[in-house]
Each structure stands twice: as structure tokens, then as C-alpha cells.
Amino acid sequence: MSFLIRRGWSGMLIILSAALGGALLALTAVDGSRYTVWLFIAGLSGLALSWLAWRSLRRGFVHSLWEDANPSMAKGPKIVVIGGGTGLATIIRGLKNVTDNLTAIVTVADDGGSSGRLRHEFGMLPPGDIRNCLIAMADIEPLMERLMQYRFEGGIGLAGHNFGNLFLTAMTNITGDFELAIKQSSKVLAVRGQVLPATLEDVTLRAVMRDGSEISGESKLREQDIGIERIDLLPADCRPVDEALAALAEADLIVLGPGSLYTSIIPNLLVAEISEAVRNASGLRVYACNAMTEPGETTGYKASDHLQALLAHGGPGLVDVMLVNSEPVPEDLIAVYAEAGSTPVVADMEAIEALGVTPLGEALITKTGLVRHDAEKFNKVLLSLLRAKGLTTAPGARWRRRFRQILKELSREDREK
């Protein structure tokens, strides 16, 4: 109530509309005339309009700090996230409450599970990672989200399939185009921002292993324990989506990850024009390293090893800041993850800095049975980085010194809390 009163006339009109709607609904309980139905409809409409106006006002209030500093950006900062998998979807859930100018560029190299089956049976791009991002960005009720994430456990041909994947498959068949299917699905799900595939071409992930052997297919990479030397996409000259290049060029902030290094993040950068656009971008570029290593992909990797692999595939000058979790992982969770061959990523800050990237250690994880990035903590750090970048407008070395100074101050403040 106090929030609405502080909004002035807008808030007072919402309060009056809600009060009138409630009064009309209350009147239907005692009124037995032929106008009862119309009173009920009018009362319900008043409450619904009040609720919609309240939501709109609240969202405007969330954006106000950014808008005050950047009047031309009334929908919030322009943020692009790059990756795939559950890690990216988790972060998107928080970012959609910060800005409407949100773009997710998502890998389409998946060839396993439900996505792989649909890809081979229908000749379409894998929908799984796209689906996760659409749902994370959407304004939908919990039941609708459960429906879109529902996985069939039985049925001939249905077992293992995800309803959301089937939804995107049907939409692709109706529209005749995967990109258009994503756009139409975004409208149906009331998505805030846009979800874009890294490429619309049928690509295959190929890896050269440390012993010189080659493996083709993303799903097979997760099954090996030899160690990955390098990966590439076939065809190598695949083209990106034009909207992805435009979003990168205009971005205030570009976030790579979190997510699987070789199967979620790097495949996007193997689309040559995307990695070039990231390197040439004027926005702040942040790489969010995983908190735990992944068996088969990054076994034994320190934080700097993740960064070195990223730069080897995406090119030097790809990122400005590397976010590393500095929060200790509980011993009981370390033991659980160790059984699967996963360990906490060591934050070797000096080695990161030696690669020409500013390291930033922060408490970033949630520890409720699984070690995952906490969206609220993560987004707080990202917004602090955006504010820091806004304060550092001097060119060249002076810009970099001032920026690093602010990062150290932010780190010190978090340690003192």
C-alpha cells in the first residue's frame, strides 16, 4: 500500500480501482437481482485491471535506477547471455526482472535425448536448450511451466520426450521455419526479450582428444574420459542469425555462461561471426566460470584452464572480466560430487590475470542439494559491474586501472558483509 501511495496519482487510481472492484464483488453476495452477473464481471474486471497496473508499476520501479542514469534506455540495460543448458536458464530467470532488453544466444549442437531424437526424426534443430531459455524468460503461471517441462515416462514413441520440445516441434511444422517457431512461441509464452539460436544450420560438434583421436556428436563428448584438446563445428562456415550480431553490437553487457564449457558455451563461439562480434563489442564482456568441474569435459581444470580453453576457441580479447565462485562448497556436497568425478573449481586468480583478464571472486552459489549459481547473487554482481563500467569512461590504460580499482572495492565490500 505504501509503495502505491508513493507512486502518486497512478498508485491512488490503482487503489481506488481495486477497492471498487472488491466492493462490487461483495455486492454480488447480497444482491439477488438480474444484475448480479454484471456486477460480478465488473468487480472481477476492476480487480484484474488493478493487478495488471500494479505489476506494470512494480516492473517500472525495478528499472528506475538504471533509467535515471540512462534516460534513453527505458526498458533497462541491453544484456546478451551466451550458452545453453540449465545454468544459462537459471541466470535468465533473474535477469528478466532487471531488463526487457534481454537476448539469449543458444547453442544448437545437441544430439542426445529428446532433442536428438526430434532432430533426427523431423530434420529440425534441437529444441531442448531453446525451450529452457524460453520458459526461463516467460511470464507464465507455475502450472504452465510444469506442463512445458513435463517429460513423458511411458507411451510408444513418447517415452523420454519433453512436452515443451514437442510443442516447439509442432510450432516448427505449423510455421515451416524453426526461427519463426521460436518467435511465435515467445508470443504465446509472453517472453521478456528474445531467444536466438546461434545458427540455423544443421551443425555437428567434433572434438579432437588429447590422444589424437576424434569424436563427433555432443552427447558422445560427455561419455569419454580421455580429455578434450580442441573442438570445432561442422560445417565450419556456418552463418549466425542476424539478430544475434545486432544484439551483440548494441549490448551494454555480454555474459558467457555459466554452463558446460565445451558443450554449451564454446559451440556458440565456433560460429565465427559470433566470436568476432563479441571481440569487437563495446559492452562489458563477462565470463562466468562453473563452480564445479564436469567429468569428461573439464576434469582437473582450474579456473584459468577454463579461461584458456575459452580464449583458444574464441580468440584473444574475448572477455574483460572472469567471475569465479569464492564461496566454499560444503564438505558433504564435495563428497557427493566426488562420486561422480566432479570437484570444486580452484580459483587461481593470478593465472587468470596473466591471461589479460580481470578476475573477480564472489560468493555466487546456492547449496541446496546441488551446487548451482544463485540467480540473485549472480545478478547483483552483474549490476555492480554495469555500474562500475558506467563510472569508468576514461580511455586506454586509465580506464582499465580505474575499472580494476572498482572491482577490488566491490570484492572487498562483499568479503566484509
Image (tube, helix red, strand yellow):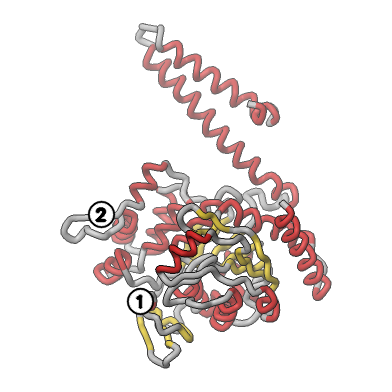
Q: Is residue 139 above or below residue 298?
A: above
Q: In the picture provided, is 73 more to the left or to the right than 33? A: right
Query: Is residue 27 in sight in this rendering?
Result: yes
The structure residue drawn at horizontal position 62% and vertical position 71%, both measured from the top left corner, is 347
Q: Extreme left residue here?
A: 156
> Up-down: is 185 above or below 140?
below
The kind of residue on which mark 1 rests is Glu
The tag on residue 67 is none
Q: Quadrant of residue 224?
A: bottom left
Residue to which mark 2 is pinned: 152
Disc 2 element:
loop
Query: x%, y% of residue 316?
Result: 63, 82
Disc 2 from disc 1: Cα separation: 24 Å
Q: Nearer the viewer, residue 293 or 314?
A: 293
Frontmost residue, 174 versus 47? 47
Q: Nearer the viewer, residue 294 or 233?
A: 294
Viewer can see residue 271: no
Q: Is residue 300 above or below residue 253?
A: below
Residue under label 1, please give it.
223
